[in-house]
Image (cartoon, rainbow, N blue to C red):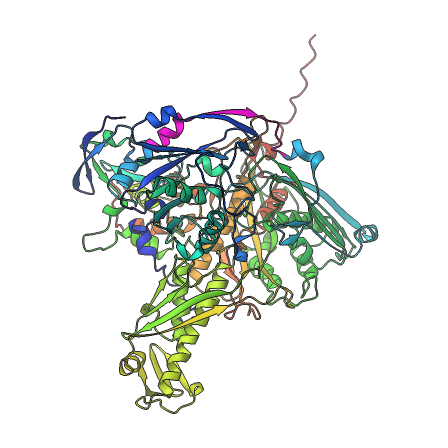
């Protein structure tokens, strides 16, 4: 695999050029090459959702996405959510207030999905939230609290429903 | 008292967790870090006939391929002992890569070390291993004839047989008997963070970052196996991404990583893959249980016989003890609990959340439901009537609350409105049913002395420290709350230090003992520090409190004052600065009461569920769950509630989703990923109500803490099974209660008209 080639990813608004082999997943590029370890590796098989990030504004599983395929695209990770002054995104704040996690390992993926859920117009009811959040496994089973956090952000209008 | 204990404060590490700043073990970046991948045996029994590493070694980035021939011999044989006990705690009494024999599928046979994660994984694929397969036993069915009754379980900690009275006579005396046989599939913990270890040698000193429920257990185990002195091994674990028992024992990959790092002389990280997690860290064993209960017409029990048969490795007499609840909950004089084992070709099973008693209670509480039905007694009233104030040794419970949990839960749930007749309530295509079960889980007194340190700086801030690690319980938050009250400073002034064997040592946080141990040692350290500061003040001529009796001095919000006279006193900071002390410090320790102390040690609760069953599709949906628990002092109700919700939803998974079949042809699990091994997802989880029943617990922990890690799960599988009976009129004796079991045969088609 002596085929490393320079690849430029825009991560959290910053252009980063890396020598990457084509086999490197977006998740490993973030974690091992950019030391952005907020995106988690739970299964590396696309079944747990812990690696959820946004690519050009859509939520994707970073473990099933090749990093070189994201060249020229905008990647947003959990590290890119809080304001520059450290102010938490309303969804991050709601997760803390509702204790919507325990060990915290699935949490970045849950939050990245939760924000998109509202934008996608899929957070209208508890049933919708439960259904559309089911790609993010929480083994601590904080599910009722995750729903409560999403409801709070939805009801406060802090994340716009892009489909409305 | 500033009263920090009992407040529902947010997690102190919440911000780190929601921003991605919390670093877990596989995220520790070290200069020159290398990456390991395991090559594991695909056969359950046999020998390695040869290993060809040439292709792997030729691959770019691969640094070494290590086999049994390269690895050092272990210094001492591993002997399984639960990590709570405080000694070396290997999960299996066997260490791989010492010879060519294979005893279970997933056993490591080679380690590839490479410059990158990708190169290591590819290198592991390229290692060609030859095997000679031998016959194997990997299921109960295959090994039934070879079952034996061991003398002891759990590394010799518990007897395999527990009996009293005369069970045969008791059963003969009974008016009513239930005699039921159950089957339960194997379970896997599947925390979302895969186990990981990073090891780095500096000369003779070894630092290990390990995803563990006990840094101390990792230190002790690696020291035992390597023969390296404890003082030269430091283990660090700041965040663990879930454990559930999987990381309670120290499994071979941890020491293998330390060995391999020593060979390549580079820092080395090993993260197990999701499929490897099904083989490398134990599991809840496939098992069968049988229970026979005899009762008089009025409900009084005359005898219980409770047997368990399960499969373990060829190395260990391991079975999760399953008979504690049936022995203790309902005060039966004639009792027989027996564990029998088949030694087969799997790894040693291990603690899985709610070890033993969740399945023991599933059996007991579903059987009681059948008994209550036969007797025509309400299942709640039967349990309350039977539950004694003492354990089987005659020792009074340190605190009880079972009856209150049943009554409180019943009221909150609306139990009195249930349809008593099975199959009497419908909602469209769905049959609706409700179920109840009681819960009891042992409070384990097996730990050695626990230690903590409290330090107060002259600026008024305080640090409380112990070696325990955070894996979701919120232990850091709880430490600040306990420390604040014990020292006498505001909650905001306290920081918790943890996750490092260089700190005063705490045992592995297992068996619901984490909060109990840590709160006790931190409380005692904080109290010792406060007493030290009071002593300093009353002996200091320049202090406004000089000459008072220490008992006349009270402490709150970082200030010492004369009792009843707040104006007479001074801040901690003033006292320290005047005495030219940059800080004051004290250690505290706690030991559990002796095992033979006359204490009844169970935590109690009650579970209520409503299910909807589609009999044509076999679907069981849990619509509502109410749990009422009496866990003694609740240090932080917000966090305790979360942990109890998690436990209850684990019970839902255990009841309806979680089970793995062993394929005996290959000796491997049928499911090896989260797509096929089903765990509850958001859409499976109903809203969950948790009620706390206040009880004052005395005689075990100085704050009256009993722990909430397991009790939330206990009884749920029974309550769901009982609810499915109430919905459908059918009894089930198998877990998980999968759709194919619940599905009802379509009504027979009418006979075709005779052709004329």
Where B699 sits versus B352, above or below?
Answer: below
Q: Quadrant of the C terminus of chain B?
A: top right
Please check the rendered image and state whether residue B593 is part of the magenta-colored stretch, yes or no.
no
B497 on left or right of B298: left
Pick the residue in front: B77 or B357: B77
Q: Is residue B125 magenta?
A: yes
Q: Quadrant of the image for the N terminus of chain B?
A: bottom left
In-front residue for pair B669/B678? B669
Among the 4 quarters of the image, the one containing residue B113: top left
Q: Is B266 placed left or right of A138 in the picture?
A: left
Residue B732 visible to an observer of this rendering: no
Residue nearest the viewer, comparing B44 with A122: B44
Image coordinates for residue B677, horizontal then vertical, percent: 49, 36
Q: Is residue B486 visible?
A: yes
Q: Position of residue B152 (x, y in %)?
A: 66, 50
Q: Where are the magenta residues, as a range?
A: B119-139
Residue farthest left in this picture:
A15
Q: How many marks?
A: 0
Q: Position of residue B413 (x, y in %)?
A: 54, 55
Residue toward you, B263 or B538: B263
Toward the top, the furthest residue is B756
Question: Which residue corresponds to the image point at 64% horizontal and 22% vertical from the top-left?
Answer: B749
Give the quarter of the image for residue B440. Answer: bottom right
Q: Position of residue B503 (x, y in %)?
A: 39, 62
Above/below status of A52 relative to B123: below
């Amino acid at each position: 695999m002596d085929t490393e080639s320079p690849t430029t990813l825009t991560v959290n608004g910053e252009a980063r050029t890396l020598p990457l082999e084509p086999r490197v997943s977006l998740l490993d590029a973030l974690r091992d090459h950019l030391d952005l370890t907020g995106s988690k590796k739970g299964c590396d098989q696309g079944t747990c959702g812990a690696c959820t990030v946004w690519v050009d504004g859509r939520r994707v599983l970073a473990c099933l996405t090749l990093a070189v395929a994201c060249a020229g695209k905008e990647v947003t990770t959990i590290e890119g959510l809080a304001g520059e002054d450290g102010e938490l995104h309303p969804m991050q704040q709601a997760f803390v207030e509702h204790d919507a996690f325990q060990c915290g390992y699935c949490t970045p993926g849950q939050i990245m999905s939760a924000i998109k859920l509202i934008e996608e117009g899929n957070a209208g009811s508890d049933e919708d939230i439960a259904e559309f959040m089911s790609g993010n496994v929480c083994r601590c089973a904080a599910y009722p609290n995750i729903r409560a956090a999403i409801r709070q952000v939805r009801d406060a209008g802090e994340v716009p429903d892009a489909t409305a | 008292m500033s009263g920090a204990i009992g407040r529902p404060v947010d997690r102190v590490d919440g911000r780190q967790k929601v921003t991605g700043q919390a670093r877990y073990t596989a995220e520790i970046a070290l200069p020159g870090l290398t990456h390991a991948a395991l090559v594991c045996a695909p056969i359950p029994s046999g020998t390695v006939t040869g290993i060809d590493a040439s292709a792997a070694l030729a691959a770019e980035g691969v640094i070494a391929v290590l086999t049994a021939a390269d690895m050092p011999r272990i210094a001492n044989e591993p002997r399984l002992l639960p990590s709570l006990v405080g000694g070396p705690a290997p999960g299996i009494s066997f260490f791989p890569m010492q010879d060519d024999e294979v005893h279970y599928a997933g056993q490591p046979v080679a380690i590839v070390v490479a410059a990158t994660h990708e190169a290591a994984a590819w290198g592991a694929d390229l290692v060609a291993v030859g095997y000679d397969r031998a016959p194997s036993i990997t299921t109960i069915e295959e090994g039934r004839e070879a079952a034996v009754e061991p003398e002891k379980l759990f590394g010799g900690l518990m007897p395999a047989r527990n009996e009293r009275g005369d069970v045969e006579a008791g059963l003969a005396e009974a008016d009513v008997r239930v005699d039921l046989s159950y089957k339960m599939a194997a379970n896997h913990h599947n925390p979302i963070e895969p186990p990981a270890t990073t090891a780095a040698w500096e000369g003779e000193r070894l630092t290990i970052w390990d995803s563990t429920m006990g840094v101390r257990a990792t230190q002790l185990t690696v020291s035992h196996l390597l023969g390296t002195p404890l003082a030269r091994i430091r283990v660090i674990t700041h965040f663990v991404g879930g454990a559930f028992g999987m990381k309670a024992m120290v499994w071979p990959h941890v020491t293998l990583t330390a060995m391999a790092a020593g060979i390549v002389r580079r820092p080395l990280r090993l993260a197990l893959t999701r499929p490897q997690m099904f083989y490398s860290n134990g599991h809840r064993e496939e098992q069968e249980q049988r229970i026979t209960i005899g009762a008089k017409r009025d409900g009084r029990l005359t005898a219980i016989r409770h047997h368990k048969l399960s499969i373990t490795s060829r190395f260990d007499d391991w079975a999760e003890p399953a008979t504690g609840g049936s022995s203790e909950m309902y005060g039966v004089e004639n009792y027989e609990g027996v564990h029998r084992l088949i030694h087969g070709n799997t790894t040693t099973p291990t603690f899985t959340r709610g070890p033993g008693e969740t399945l023991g209670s599933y059996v007991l509480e579903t059987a009681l439901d059948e008994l209550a039905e036969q007797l025509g007694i309400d299942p709640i009233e039967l349990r309350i009537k039977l539950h004694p104030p003492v354990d089987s040794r005659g020792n009074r419970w340190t605190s009880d609350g079972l009856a209150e949990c049943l009554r409180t839960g019943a009221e909150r749930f609306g139990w009195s409105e249930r349809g008593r007749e099975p199959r009497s309530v419908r909602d469209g295509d769905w049959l609706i049913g409700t179920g109840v079960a009681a819960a009891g889980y042992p409070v384990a007194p097996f730990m050695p002395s626990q230690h903590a340190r409290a330090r107060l700086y002259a600026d008024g801030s305080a640090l409380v420290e112990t070696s325990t690690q955070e894996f979701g319980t919120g232990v850091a938050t709880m430490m600040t709350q306990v420390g604040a009250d014990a020292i006498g400073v505001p909650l905001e002034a306290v920081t918790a230090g943890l996750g490092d064997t260089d700190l005063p040592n705490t045992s592995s946080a297992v068996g619901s003992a984490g909060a109990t141990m840590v709160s006790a040692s931190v409380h005692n350290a904080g109290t010792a520090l406060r007493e030290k500061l009071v002593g300093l003040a009353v002996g200091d001529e320049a202090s406004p409190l000089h000459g008072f009796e220490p008992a006349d001095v009270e402490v709150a919000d970082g200030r010492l004052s004369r009792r009843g006279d707040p104006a007479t006193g001074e801040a901690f900071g003033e006292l320290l600065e005047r005495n030219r002390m940059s800080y004051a410090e004290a250690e505290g320790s706690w030991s559990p009461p002796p095992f033979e102390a006359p204490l009844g040690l169970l935590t109690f609760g009650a579970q209520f569920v409503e299910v909807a069953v589609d009999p044509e599709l076999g679907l069981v949906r849990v619509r509502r769950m109410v749990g009422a628990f009496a866990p003694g002092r609740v240090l932080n109700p917000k966090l305790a509630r979360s942990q109890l919700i998690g436990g209850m939803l684990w019970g839902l998974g255990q009841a309806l989703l979680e089970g793995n079949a062993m394929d005996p042809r290959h000796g491997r699990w049928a499911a090896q990923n989260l797509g096929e091994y089903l765990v509850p997802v958001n859409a499976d989880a109903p809203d969950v109500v948790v009620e706390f029943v206040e009880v004052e617990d005395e005689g075990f922990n100085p704050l009256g803490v009993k722990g909430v890690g397991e009790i939330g799960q206990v009884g749920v599988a029974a309550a769901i099974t009982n609810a499915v009976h109430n919905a459908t009129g059918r009894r089930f004796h198998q877990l998980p209660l999968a759709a194919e079991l619940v599905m009802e045969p379509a009504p027979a088609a009418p006979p075709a008209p005779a052709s004329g």
